[in-house]
Image (cartoon, rainbow, N blue to C red):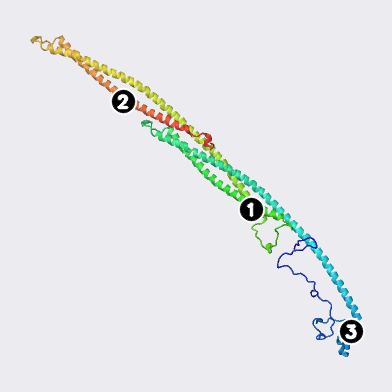
Amino acid sequence: MELIGSTRTSTYARPKTSHFLPAISTMASSYRNTQLAPAFNPSANMWRTNSYYKSTTVPSLSPIQHDTFDLVRARTALYPSNRTALTARYTPDDWYKSNHIHYRESESSRKSAERLRKDTIRLIQDKEQLTRRTQESTSKNIADRLNDIVFWKSELTHEIDNMVTEIAALSEAKRRLERALAETEGPVQVSRECLFHREKRMSIDLVHDDVEKALIKEVEVVKSCQEKMRRLLDRAIAQLASNRAAQHELEKDMSDKVTAQRIDDKCHHLRNTSDGISYYRGIDRLDHSVSLPDSWSKFTDDNILLSQSQRAASHKLRDEMEILLNATSSEMWNQFNSVNVAFTTRVSETADAKNSLHAHLAKTLQEIFQTEMLVESLQKAIRDKEWPLKVAQTRLEERTRRPNVELCRDNPYHRLVNEVREIEDTIHKLQERLMEAEATLQTLVKTKITLEHDLSIKANSLFLDQEKCMSMRKSFPSMPRLVGYT
């Protein structure tokens, strides 16, 4: 119990509680009477008033007291009328003995009281020192606890900072992976467009060439890279969730420790003169604890170890993401270059074929022109033979009109017949040669048409490969964009 006040004239206030002990009264009725009142017989005081005498048991008497007691009884028996005066008197020895008894009892009481007072003062001092030492020890324990809290707070702060940094790094790596994945949509779309455009090739040029094989492989490569990126992106999302969960546990633990530090710091600075202190009866019998010092430190240590393991997994995942981005970008670029090389080779081959077709077409056109000139020459030659034939036949017809014996089979007749036959044979051969020339001309024309159609096919293929596909492939993302950098 703490009393408020410092001087003798100060008034002290007692705490208002129903359990405070009542004050010790200083009235005479509160002291025990250790002096035995003399009594001669149990019924001697029956006629006295209760306000002066009290009945008591007769203690054992000494021999002198027994003689005195017998004398009094005799006198009482002899003088019944003076009973009151005789029973109120004692002998001088009784008086001295009574005084000595009182002295001894007083001295014994004083010594006992002095011994009790000294023992009580010593007990008060010992208990005061014990209370002070216990309070100091408790304060020291609270200070040690505060040091432990501060230590684990620093560990938690360091780990939270590291986790925040790791979450930021993993988030940035995840964004890079997402950008790289988005960049792959362009190349795969270009490859598909190239395949669709090359389906517009015509006739013989619609071949499954190296370009088409390279384009199909490019689509497969990009699709494979996209699948790898998506799987790694799902792992990154899950790892970010684990990192944030670990960070949440650390921050929750940190918040609890901040609250515990504030409470323990307040308790550490509480003094006997502090405000706000009060009685809380039975609080020492209640135990709201949910942990022990070992489990308390192990809880925070487990949180830190979990965070460290998640950070290690996150760092490993970031390394995998970096390796995957570099590998996929290199793979896609290598295939892109392979397709471009195949396109270049195919365009060169098509251009060479087109140039050869142009040359053959030019020669065919020249031959067609010459064959047409030959046909015209043959037709003219045939026409030119008509007049000599007419002349020879006219001569023979006219000579048939010779009279009588003049119708002679002479040399002119034989010569005219041979001439007609020669001219007819010549015309027949010229007509055959004309037919051959016309057939050859027809073949040349067909060849020209074929060459022109093939030229149009080659021109279409060149347009598709060189103008359509190669121009689209110029939009292929660069290496920094394929690894997620903008």
247 or 276, which is in the foreground? 276
Disc marking residue 218: none
Q: Is residue 15 above or below residue 421?
A: below
Residue under label 1, please give it. 256
The span from disc 1 to disc 3 (Cα, nearest Å) is 87 Å
Q: How far from the left and from the top, in percent, is residue 351? A: 41, 26
- Residue 417 in view, yes or no: no
Residue under label 3, please give it. 68
Amino acid at the residue labelled 2: Lys
Amino acid at the residue labelled 1: Asp
User: What residue sits 32% from the left and 20% below the top?
Assistant: 367
Among numbered discs 2 and 1, the one appearing first in the sequence: 1
User: On the rendered structure, is 413 left or right of 50?
Assistant: left
The quarter holding residue 415 reads: top left
Of circles 2 and 1, the one toward us is 1
Amino acid at the residue labelled 3: Thr
Q: Is residue 70 above or below residue 96?
A: below
- SS at badge 1: helix
- SS at badge 2: helix
- Residue 389 in view, yes or no: yes
Mark 3 is surrounded, within 10 Å at the Cα level, by few (under 14), some (14 to 19) or many (20 or more) other residues, namely: some
User: On the rendered structure, is 151 left or right of 314?
Assistant: right
Disc marking residue 446: 2
Q: How far from the left and from the top, in percent, is residue 321? A: 55, 41
